[in-house]
Image (cartoon, rainbow, N blue to C red):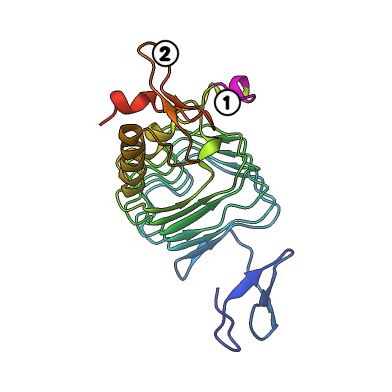
Amino acid sequence: MICPNCGAEIEVFKNGYGICSFCGSKVEIDLKNKVSDNQLIIPFGTIEIKNSEYKNNRNLVTVIIPDTVQYIGESAFENCERLEEVNIPRSIRKIGNYAFKNTGLKSLNIPNSIEQIGKEAFMDCNNLTDLFIEPEFNYSLNQTFKKCSNLNNVQCNLYDFYPSLIRGTETHEKKDSRSTFFDAFQGTEFYYKIFDAFQKSYNSGVCFLCGGTIKKPFIGYHQCQKCGCDYSMIRSLK
């Protein structure tokens, strides 16, 4: 939302008011759950965005979600092809299957407070180029960003992914139900960049994450002797 006094961005606060980030003006916001000027402001106090609630909406460009929302339903914004911007507040606990599939999102920040992200939640977002995944997350990634073809700039802690990167760590049992890193990012530029790094490391015998030596037994896991990073999947992935 743009400040009517100076044209700068409005920072949405509680109780129907926003504060301009530049001039400090207090602006009253209509908290009706509707799309206005291609922008949707979810009312403060909303707990759930329902399944398929805005699916196939061709007008949405920006969605502002308050920090009362805990659940984004299945296919809630699927096929909103013009949707470029959405915030994911720390109040969110679950994002449903296909919630933002095939949208026009350009960047995304995912907090580690989320407990569950559904299958293909952000799949086919071809305009998505920048992604930040807060470290020490506890949710699975099941084809989450698959076929987001232009996704290249991903900031995340690779050690948070299991089982495709790490085996034998103290967090083994906690993370063994997670879908793999390569499954989550298949078909993205980031996938091919990391795969190439793994391939070169595997061929050289030197781990690209920590510089340790990669052990390659005839039987068993091929993994870094220093950090435990697993390179076994390189033999089967393409």
Tell me where residue 235 sits by quadrant.
Answer: top left
Residue 78 located within the stretch drawn in magenta = no
Camera-side residue: 52 or 125?
125
Q: Quadrant of the C terminus?
A: top left
Check disc 1 and report the residue beneath it. 175
**In the current view of this chain or complex, which residue is farthest to the right?**
15
**In the current view of this chain or complex, which residue is farthest to the top?**
219
Task: Name the residue rendered at 64%, 83% in the picture.
Answer: 22
Task: Name the residue rendered at 38%, 57% in the picture.
Answer: 129
- Marking on residue 149: none
Tell me where residue 204 sits by quadrant.
Answer: top left
Magenta extent: 168-173
Q: Position of residue 234 (x, y in %)?
A: 32, 28
Q: Quadrant of the N terminus?
A: bottom right
Camera-side residue: 222 or 118?
222
Mark 1 vs 2, N-terminal side = 1
- Marking on residue 220: 2
Q: Kindly identify the amino acid type of the residue bearing the numbered disc 1.
A: Lys
Quick one: SS at disc 1? Answer: helix
Q: Kindly identify the amino acid type of the residue bearing the numbered disc 2.
A: Gly
Tell me where residue 14 sits by quadrant.
Answer: bottom right
129 up-or-down from 203: above or below:
below
Q: Position of residue 141 (x, y in %)?
A: 48, 34
Q: Position of residue 171 (x, y in %)?
A: 63, 25
Principal secondary structure, stretch drawn in magenta: loop
162 up-or-down from 81: above or below:
above
Quick one: SS at disc 2? Answer: loop
